[in-house]
Amino acid sequence: SPPAHLSDWGKVAWGRLTVLLDGMGILTVADSLALERLCDIYADILQLRLTIADEGRTYIVQTEGGFLIKANPAVAMLADADRRFKSYLVEFGLTPAARTKVKVDGGEEKEDPLNQFFG
C-alpha cells in the first residue's frame, strides 16, 4: 500500500507503478524511497499542469514604461519537474532506451543485438 504521506495523485501513481514495475520483475523493497520520489514528482506535475491551465503560461505586469509579459513561474517549475521525472523513469527502466539496459529478475544485463550490427 502507498505511504500515507503521499498526496492522492501520488497514491494513484504508486498503485499504477507498483503493478507495472512488479510485472516487469524489477521492483524490490529497496526501491521504495525512489518510487516515493517518482510518485511525488508525478503528483507535482499534475498539480502544476492544473495551475498553468487555470492561470495561463504568462501574466502581464504594469511597469513605468508600459506592460511586460512574464512567464508564469509554474511553467519553469513544470519543466524542472519533467526533467526530474524523466530521470526517475530512466532509473526504473520506464523509457524505451532505458529498458534495454535494465536487469530483470536478477538476470544479466541484455545487450540489444542491433548494437553489434550498427556499432
Image: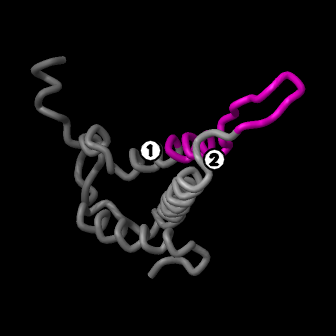
Compared with residue 64, is residue 55 higher up or lower down, i.e. above or below? below
Q: Is residue 34 visible?
A: no
Q: What residue does disc 1 label?
A: 86
- 78, 105: nearer the viewer: 78
Which residue type carries mark 1?
Answer: Lys
In this rendering, the answer to whether 73 lies above or below 25 is: above
Instruction: Specify whether residue 38 is painted magenta.
Output: no
Give the x, y percent position of residue 67.
Answer: 76, 29
Tell me if I can see residue 95 in this picture.
yes
The residue that label 2 is drawn on is 74
Q: Would residue 84 be found to the left or right of residue 12 on screen?
A: right
For the point 26% across and 42% down, the residue is 96
Magenta span: 60-83
Q: Does residue 65 sit above or below 78 in this rendering?
A: above
Identify the image quadrant of the N terminus: bottom left
Q: Nearer the viewer, residue 51 or 21?
A: 51
Mark 2 or 1, which is nearer the eye? 2
Image x and y of residue 109, in percent: 25, 43
Q: Find residue 60 and report its image quarter.
A: top right
Judging from the image, what secondary structure is the residue with disc 1 in? Answer: helix
Q: Residues within 10 Å of mark 1 (few under 14, many from 20)?
A: some
